[in-house]
Image (tube, grey):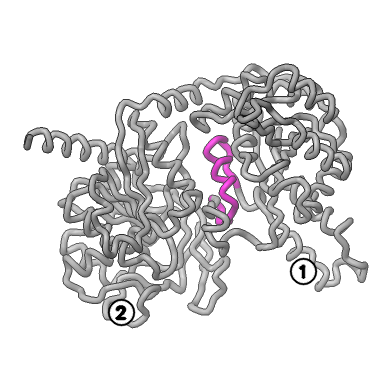
C-alpha cells in the first residue's frame, strides 16, 4: 500500500523543494523502498513544452515522451526509478480534462466546481501516480499563500484524511532568514507560513528550514512551539557545497527516520556510499577545464539544467571540475574571440532562427582548430550545415526552419515517423507547436567501426528526443564522401541520429538529448568521453605553450 509524502514550500520561492524531495527519495530508496516523485504545477499551461525557457527553465523529457517540469530531471538523476507522464501535471492539464468531461456530458448536467470536481481530478492523478510504489513523494509547486495553488492544497488536505494518519506525511520547506547586521536568525516568516497552511486545514508534520546558519536548540524549540511541530521534526537545511552532498546531510540530520517513524515503517539503515563517492569526487577534483556552451538562453542557466548536470557528471567520472563558459550565440557573429581558451565547445538544442549563425561560427571554430565539439539536437544540425557550406561548398546550405527557400535544405521538417511503440505519427507546418515533436525514448543503431560505437560500446542505444526538424537524407552521401560519417541511425535507417568527423580529434553530434539520461552515479558515455577529450586538449595546449616558452 503506497504511502504519500507531500512537500510544500513557504515564505519565498526557489528554496529547493525539488532537490529536497529528490534527496529524501534517495535516502528512502537506499533503505530498500521503491520511490517515485510527482510534481504538481499550479500554472494554467497544459505542459511546459511551449513555455519560454527564460521564464520556466528547461523542459525535461521523460522516456514516454512527456514534456515536463525541470524538477523531474532532479528526480531521475537522484532516483533509480524513471519518471513518466503521470509524474507531472499542471492546473491547465487538470482543467482541460474536466472541461472535456463536461462537454461530453459525463457530469450529467451537474454544476462543475473546484470542489469536488477539480480536487477529485487532482486526487485521482496523485493516487494513480503513486500506484505500485512503496513511497510517493508529491511536490506542490509554488508558494503557500498563492491563489493558484489553493486547489492543490485543498486536494492534499482531503487526501490526508482519505489516506489516514500513517499513510501520509506533510513536509513544509521554509526560509529562516539570517539578519547579518543584527546577528540574528528570524523565525517569524516560518511561523506565518505555517499559520497560512493551518488556516486551510493543513498541519505540517516536518519542517525543513533553509538557513544560512545552523539553527541552535533554542531556535528549533521556538519554531516547534509556535508551529505545533515536534522539535525533532524541525530540520535545518543549510546551503551545500554540492547538491550531491544533500542526501547524506539530510540522513545525518535524521529526516528519513522522522518520516519513517511517522509512516510506521521499519527499514534497514541506508547505504549511501555511492553518493559519498560522487560528492567526494565532485568536491575534490584533480583537474580543471573550460567548456564553452554556445546557446541563446544563457541569461538563465536553468534553461540548460540537465546539460549543466551532465557535464558535471562527466567531470566526476574524470575527476575534473568542469567550468562552463556561457556564450550567447548572437555575440559570436562579431566576437569569435569569446571562444579563445576553451577546452571544448558544446552547442545545445534550441528553436528559432535567432543566434543560429553564431552557432555555425562556433562549429567552424571547433572544427578548424581541432577543439573537441559536442553538438546536441540543433547542435548536430548546425554542424552539418557548417560542413555543407565550408567543406562541401554547398553555398546557402541551411535548415528550412531558418530559410524556407534555401537552395540546399540540409535539414527539413519531417512529416512522418515511427515512434517507440511502432505507431506512425504525422505533422505538417500548420500543426500546433505543442505535442507535435518527435518526443521521448527511441532506439538508435550505431554503425560498427565509428567513434560513436566506440563511445557507447554497443550497437543499440535508447535515447530521448525532442525536435521537429530532421536531416535531409538526400545530402547524406555528399556529406559522407567529404569526410563526415553517420555514426547512428534511427530504425530502418530512415533518420540520422549521430554524426562525426573522421579527421578531427573529437567531433561528435547527436539528434537526441543524452543529457536527459545522465546521472551522477553512472554518468553518460557521451559526456564522459567529451570531458576526457577536452581534458586531453587542455593538457596538449599547456604542453605546446610550455614548449614555446
Q: Is mark 2 on a helix, strand or loop?
A: loop
Q: How far apart are marks 2 and 1 (CA)?
A: 42 Å
Residue 57 lies, in percent from the top left, at 54, 53
Extent of the magenta region = 63-83
Q: In this view, does 159 lie above or below 320?
A: below
Residue 285 lies, in percent from the top left, at 35, 27
> Could you tell whether 538 is left or right of 25 in the image?
left
In the image, farthest residue toward the left: 548
- Disc 2 or 1, which lies upstream in sequence? 1
Magenta residue check for 64 = yes
Res. 458 image quadrant: top left
Q: What element carries label 1?
A: helix
> Could you tell whether 398 is left or right of 434 in the image?
left
What residue do we see at 22% from left, 56% from top? 365
Badge 2 is on which residue? 406
Q: In this view, does 71 lie above or below 498?
A: above
Badge 1 is on which residue? 100
Amino acid at each position: 500500500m503506497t504511502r504519500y509524502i507531500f512537500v510544500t514550500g513557504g515564505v519565498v520561492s526557489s528554496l529547493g523543494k525539488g532537490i529536497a524531495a529528490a534527496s529524501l527519495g534517495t535516502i528512502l530508496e537506499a533503505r530498500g523502498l521503491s520511490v517515485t516523485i510527482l510534481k504538481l504545477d499550479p500554472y494554467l499551461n497544459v505542459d511546459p513544452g511551449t513555455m519560454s525557457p527564460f521564464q520556466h527553465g528547461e523542459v525535461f523529457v521523460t522516456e514516454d515522451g512527456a514534456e515536463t517540469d525541470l524538477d523531474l530531471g532532479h528526480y531521475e538523476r537522484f532516483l533509480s526509478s524513471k519518471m513518466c507522464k503521470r509524474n507531472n501535471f499542471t492546473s491547465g492539464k487538470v482543467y482541460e480534462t474536466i472541461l472535456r468531461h463536461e462537454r461530453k456530458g459525463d457530469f450529467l448536467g451537474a454544476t462543475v466546481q473546484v470542489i469536488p470536481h477539480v480536487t477529485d481530478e487532482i486526487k485521482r492523478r496523485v493516487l494513480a501516480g503513486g500506484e505500485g510504489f512503496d513511497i510517493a513523494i508529491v511536490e506542490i509547486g509554488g508558494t503557500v499563500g498563492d491563489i493558484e495553488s489553493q486547489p492543490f492544497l485543498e486536494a492534499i488536505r482531503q487526501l490526508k484524511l482519505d489516506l489516514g494518519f500513517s499513510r501520509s506525511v506533510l513536509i513544509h520547506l521554509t526560509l529562516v532568514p539570517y539578519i547579518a547586521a543584527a546577528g540574528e536568525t528570524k523565525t517569524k516568516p516560518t511561523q506565518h507560513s505555517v499559520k497560512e497552511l493551518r488556516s486551510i486545514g493543513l498541519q505540517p508534520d516536518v519542517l525543513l528550514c533553509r538557513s544560512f546558519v545552523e539553527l541552535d536548540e533554542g531556535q528549533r524549540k521556538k519554531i516547534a512551539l509556535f508551529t505545533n511541530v515536534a522539535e525533532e521534526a524541525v530540520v535545518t537545511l543549510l546551503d551545500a557545497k554540492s547538491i550531491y552532498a544533500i542526501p547524506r546531510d539530510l540522513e545525518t540530520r535524521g529526516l528519513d527516520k522522522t518520516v519513517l517513524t511517522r509512516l510506521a515503517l521499519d527499514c534497514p539503515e541506508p547505504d549511501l556510499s555511492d553518493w559519498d563517492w560522487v560528492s567526494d569526487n565532485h568536491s575534490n577534483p584533480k583537474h580543471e577545464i573550460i567548456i564553452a556552451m554556445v546557446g541563446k538562453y544563457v541569461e538563465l542557466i536553468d534553461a540548460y539544467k540537465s546539460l549543466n548536470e551532465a557535464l558535471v557528471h562527466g567531470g566526476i567520472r574524470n575527476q575534473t571540475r568542469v567550468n562552463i563558459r556561457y556564450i550567447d550565440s548572437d555575440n559570436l557573429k562579431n566576437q569569435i574571440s569569446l571562444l579563445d581558451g576553451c577546452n571544448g565547445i558544446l552547442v545545445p538544442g534550441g528553436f528559432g532562427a535567432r543566434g543560429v549563425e553564431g552557432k555555425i561560427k562556433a562549429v567552424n571554430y571547433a572544427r578548424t582548430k581541432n577543439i573537441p565539439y559536442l553538438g546536441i539536437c540543433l547542435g548536430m544540425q548546425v554542424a552539418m550545415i557548417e560542413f555543407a557550406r565550408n567543406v562541401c561548398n554547398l553555398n546557402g546550405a541551411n535548415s528550412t526552419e531558418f530559410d524556407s527557400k534555401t537552395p540546399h535544405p540540409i535539414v527539413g521538417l519531417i512529416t512522418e515517423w515511427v515512434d517507440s511503440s511502432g505507431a506512425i505519427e504525422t505533422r505538417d507546418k500548420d500543426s500546433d507547436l505543442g505535442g507535435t515533436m518527435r518526443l521521448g525514448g527511441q532506439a538508435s543503431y550505431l554503425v560498427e567501426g565509428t567513434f560513436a560505437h566506440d563511445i557507447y560500446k554497443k550497437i543499440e542505444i535508447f535515447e530521448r528526443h525532442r525536435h521537429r526538424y530532421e536531416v535531409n537524407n538526400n545530402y547524406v552521401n555528399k556529406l559522407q564522401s567529404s569526410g563526415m560519417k553517420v555514426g547512428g541511425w534511427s530504425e530502418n535507417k530512415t533518420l540520422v541520429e549521430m554524426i562525426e568527423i573522421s579527421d578531427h580529434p573529437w567531433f561528435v553530434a547527436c539528434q537526441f538529448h543524452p543529457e536527459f539520461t545522465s546521472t551522477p552515479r553512472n554518468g553518460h558515455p557521451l559526456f564522459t568521453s567529451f570531458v576526457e577529450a577536452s581534458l586531453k586538449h587542455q593538457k596538449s595546449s599547456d604542453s605546446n605553450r610550455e614548449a614555446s616558452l
